[in-house]
Every structure is written in C-alpha cells, then in structure tokens.
C-alpha cells in the first residue's frame, strides 16, 4: 500500500472509467474539427501578470485561487486557472492574427488549476475542452459557438441542460450601468471584501452565490435596460440566429460570468441535476482582452466546457455512452512455441489496425480465458503444441461461443474479414 495519495481536491482517471472522459472530450471536439477550428496547446503555467491583467485583479481566481510560484530565476508564474488568456497570448506571440485569415479559430483540451474548496463538481485540478474565435466581431460567430456546444452535448445524449444567455454591453453603455449598479450596491449591508469589489468591478457582486448577498440584490438595476442601440441590435441577432437553428435558450438578465474580460454576449450551460455546481460550461465575447494583455484590438468570442462536470451530468441523467471495447482480439498461447507464433501474429494484427491483446505471464488456459473475457474482446485465438503441429489455431467467437480451427497463415485475413 503506497503512503502517497492524490493531492486534496484532485482525482485520478483510471480505466475503465477513463474511457468515458476520453469519449466526452472527443464528442465536444468533434463538431469543432468540422467547423474550421484547429487544435492549440499552451503551457500549463504562464506569467502571473497574464492572468492578473486578463482575468481581472478583482476576481476570486486572481485574488484567492491561483497557484503561484517563483522560479529559481526569479520569474513569478502561475498554474493555468483558465485557458482563454493563454490562447490569446499564444496567437499574438505567433502573429497568427496577421496572416489575414480572421477569425483565428482554435480549440484546446487540457487541465486547469484553482485553489478552491473541494466538493463534488468542483476540483482543484479539472479538465476542459474549449474553443476560441479570435479577431472578428460578428453575431454569427457567437451563435456558431453556442450551436456547436449544444450539438456536442446532444451528441452525447444529454437533454436536461439549459442555455442561459445575456449581454454585458460594451465600453459605450456599460460604464453608465456600472455607475447605476454601484449606487445601488453601496447602500447594502455588505462585508468589506464585497464593498471593495463594488468599487473595482460591481458586476462581480451579481455573481456572488451567497444567499445573504442574493437576497439584497432584489430590485438591482439590470444591464439590459442600459444597453446602447448597437449592443441591443447585436444581441437580438444572436438570439435570432440561435432560434433559427432550433437551439433553445433562456434570457437571464442577471447572468454575469466570473471573469472581467467578458463583453456583450455571455452564456452558460447549466444542468439542474448537479446541485449547487450546476454550470457545466460557458463563455462569451471578450472584445477588449487583447488590448488588456498588450495586443491590438481583436474582438473575440469563446467558451470552455468542463469534462468532469459533463461526465457528472451524464451520470445524473443515467446516460450510458456507447464506448467500444478497447480490445477486439485476445491471443492465448499454451506453451513456448505458441507464445512465439501468436506474439508475431498479434504484432501483425495490430499493424493492420485490429486492436489486439496477449496473455502475458504464462497463465494456464483457465486464467487466460478469464483475462480474455475481462478484455471485452470479440474473438480469442487459442493455440497449443498440437494445434501448431497441425498448422492451425482455434478461433473462438466470444459472443456465440463457436470455435473454429483456422490456418496460422489465415489469421490476419480471417479476422479482417470478420471484423470488417
């Protein structure tokens, strides 16, 4: 028994359950791959200032949740708490925005790290699949991303999720709303940290999950009542495009995402079967983020969907994913000569794309067949000295139980034919 355990708030992905997580990642990525999004991967840690500037110094992520460390060379780095800012940094650094092919459309899959109070659905190490469209201001792009996320979830068999939609305005109309909201919040009974947040970013107070705060927010001014004509028209077009595509959504005038960089379109995917941690993903438009981190004006939009929470949502709905067995053929040698011959055939089968495993460790027939059953293989190849003397092996169909003798040199062709 090891004396070491996984750090608090983390988890290990182990087979066979890990296959479910891989299937979820693949399902989320699939519609992106067919919609012009290319894969991007960034380091697991970045300069602290990237997140302080981009995510926002008033956010819980920056003030409370980042894992920050100093290198031997004196650099202050942080484990990645989110991936939008790193993706934009990478695009700017590589000058992808200067190729003339805007928007730059990318997707990623990876781990994030936040020092949070661990609970079901909230971990200190978690996995997301995300998509970003960088360098274009177009309601169709916002709608496209929401539609692709909806498509991904439905392809997994999820149905009990809701899409919440709102607009956070832009640099023209949000300052007016910000001032009105501050006036409203400053007369409430709030703790010192929350009062500080009112001065820095009052919209974040609307996102406060504490009941004592939410009760006081009744009657708070709503951003939709302060939107300028341009933002109203933009948001209405997003809504119309989603409706035309048959994607259902709920207008939520109080929806505020937890990061400072969002503008205009903001949305969240929630699943009511997950309790307090109901958000399974979300995103929105972040037109000013590029300038915040030292780049040119690059209006952009994106989302991130939680792999762990999506798995929990599937479990809440009782959805069983159709995950094919990782092994199609299992080879059972009985004796040294059979080990040599069958191992060579296993290698040949793998070369032609047939998933094949082998009975290692010199097990007897009974133990080896138990392993074959556990592997989920459709066919088992069994061979002993007598079989090889006759130039054959025994091919067993694990579903029907039927067993057939076939020539050693016919194994690959026979299994290719049977497995299609």
Image (cartoon, rainbow, N blue to C red):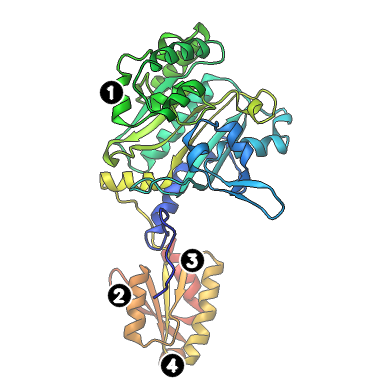
- For marks 1 and 3, the one nearer the N-term is 1
- For marks 2 and 1, the one nearer the N-term is 1
Query: Marks 3 and 4, how far apart in space?
Result: 25 Å
Residue 395 location (% of width, % of height): 38, 77
Residue 420 location (% of width, % of height): 44, 60
The residue pinned by badge 2 equals 402
Q: In the image, which is nearer the foreground, mark 1 or mark 3?
A: 1
The front one of 181 and 283 is: 181
Q: Tag 1, which secondary structure?
A: helix
- For marks 3 and 2, the one nearer the N-term is 3
Q: Which mark is residue 385?
A: 4
- For marks 2 and 4, the one nearer the N-term is 4
- For marks 1 and 4, the one nearer the N-term is 1
Up-down relation of residue 172 to residue 250 (above or below): above
The residue pinned by badge 1 equals 215
Q: Residue at x 37, y 49 (%)?
A: 118
Up-down relation of residue 372 to residue 40 (above or below): below
The residue pinned by badge 3 equals 354
């Amino acid at each position: 028994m090891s004396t070491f355990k996984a750090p608090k708030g983390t988890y290990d992905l182990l087979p066979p359950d890990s296959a479910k997580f891989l299937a979820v990642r693949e399902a989320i990525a699939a519609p992106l791959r067919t919609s012009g999004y290319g894969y991007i991967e960034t380091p697991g840690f970045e300069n602290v200032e990237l997140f302080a500037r981009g995510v926002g110094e008033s956010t819980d992520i920056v003030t409370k949740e980042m894992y920050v460390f100093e290198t031997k060379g004196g650099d202050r780095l942080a484990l990645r708490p989110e991936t939008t800012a790193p993706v934009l940094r990478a695009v700017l650094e590589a000058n992808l925005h200067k190729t003339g092919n805007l928007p730059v459309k990318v997707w990623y899959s990876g781990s994030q790290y936040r020092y949070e109070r661990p609970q079901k659905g909230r971990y200190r190490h978690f996995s997301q699949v995300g998509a970003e469209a960088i360098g274009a201001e177009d309601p169709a792009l916002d709608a496209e991303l929401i539609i692709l996320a909806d498509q991904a979830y439905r392809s997994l068999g999820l149905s009990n999720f809701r899409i919440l939609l709102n607009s956070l305005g832009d640099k023209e109309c949000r300052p007016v709303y910000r001032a009105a909201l501050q006036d409203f919040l400053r007369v409430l009974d709030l703790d010192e940290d929350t009062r500080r947040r009112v001065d820095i970013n009052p919209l974040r107070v609307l996102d406060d999950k504490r009941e004592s705060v939410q009760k006081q927010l009744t009657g708070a001014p709503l951003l939709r009542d302060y939107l300028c004509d341009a933002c109203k028209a933009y948001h209405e077009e997003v809504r119309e495009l989603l409706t035309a595509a048959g994607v259902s959504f709920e207008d939520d005038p109080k929806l505020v995402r937890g990061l400072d960089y969002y503008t205009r379109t903001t949305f969240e995917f929630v699943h009511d079967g997950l309790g307090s941690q109901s958000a399974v993903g979300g995103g929105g438009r972040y037109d000013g983020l590029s300038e915040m981190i030292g780049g040119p004006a690059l209006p952009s939009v994106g989302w991130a969907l939680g792999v762990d929470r999506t798995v929990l949502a599937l479990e809440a709905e009782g959805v069983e994913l159709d995950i094919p067995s990782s092994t199609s053929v299992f080879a059972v040698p009985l004796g040294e000569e059979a080990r040599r011959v069958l191992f060579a055939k296993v290698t040949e089968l793998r070369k032609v794309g047939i998933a094949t495993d082998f009975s290692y460790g010199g097990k007897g027939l009974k133990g080896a067949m138990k392993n074959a059953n556990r592997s989920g293989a459709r066919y088992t190849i069994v061979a002993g000295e007598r079989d090889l003397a006759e130039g054959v092996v025994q091919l067993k169909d694990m579903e029907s139980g039927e067993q057939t003798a076939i020539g050693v040199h016919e194994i690959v062709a026979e299994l290719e034919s049977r497995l299609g």
